Image (tube, rainbow, N blue to C red):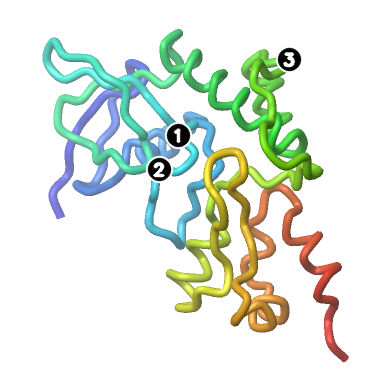
Amino acid sequence: MNTVTLKINGREVTAKEGTSVLEAARSLGIDIPTLCAYEELESAGVCRLCMVEITRGKKTRLVTSCVYPVENGLEVQTETDRVNNIRRMLIELLLPVAPSGPINALAKRFGVEKSRFKLEGPKEAPTNCSLCGLCVRYCEQVKGEHAVGFLGRGVNRKVALMADKGDECAFCRQCYSLCNSGRFVEMAEVFPDQP
């Protein structure tokens, strides 16, 4: 397989063609935040926290690093003001929905103390779900099932067990360890282990 050479934060790196910018950055020990990346799953660019600034020639733009492939001569910056401003806004959007766990750690890292955004619609207690989709994608891509899915839209979107597959999900539990918010711990209490 061919290799390409690029620069990330001024450091040169050689990577296999088809490697994502996120993977190349990680090979250098550069930490790019993400909630939705997992090695067994196809990258989806769901959370957008892994956004970076790339330069090709004289053109600069923002891209989602987990789905953007490395290219020869590409220059990548992972911590520009522009990038970090977008990350702060994304964290603010997540805070009313998922006010604990990894979102709090990211808020602290990027200096977000509170969100300007308020929940609208039904006044349900937050589930701490970041809507990263790891459980949904794992169930579909690894298990070949569709026992977990998304319901609703916008701030009312949530992860739910599909009515006709709920029992399968409750006893499989293979995606539970992927959940970075504890949502599936709540579901485990609803569907306790059978003897």
Query: Does 64 sit above or below residue 165?
Result: above
Q: Nearer the viewer, residue 100 or 123?
A: 123
Residue 193 in percent (x, y) is at 83, 81
Residue farthest along the front direction in this orientation: 121
Left or right side of 195 for 100? left
User: How crowded is the residue under tag 2: few (<14 C-alpha within 10 Å), some, or many (20+)?
Assistant: many
Q: What type is the residue that disc 1 sits on? A: Arg
Sequence-earlier tag: 3 or 1: 1
The residue labelled by disc 1 is: 48
Q: What type is the residue that disc 3 sits on? A: Glu
Q: Secondary structure at mark 3?
A: loop
Left or right side of 86 for 16? left
The residue labelled by disc 2 is: 45
The residue labelled by disc 3 is: 113
Give the residue displayed 79% in from the left and 60% down from the top.
185
Q: Are marks 3 and 2 in contact (CB under 8 Å)?
A: no
- The quarter of the rendered structure image containing the N terminus is bottom left
Between the residue at mark 3 and the residue at mark 1, the CA separation in whole angstroms equals 20 Å
Query: Does 122 sit above or below residue 109?
Result: below
Q: Nearer the viewer, residue 174 or 78?
A: 174
Q: Are marks 1 and 2 in contact (CB under 8 Å)?
A: yes
Task: Give the quarter of the image for residue 154.
Answer: top right
Between the residue at mark 3 and the residue at mark 2, the CA separation in whole angstroms equals 25 Å
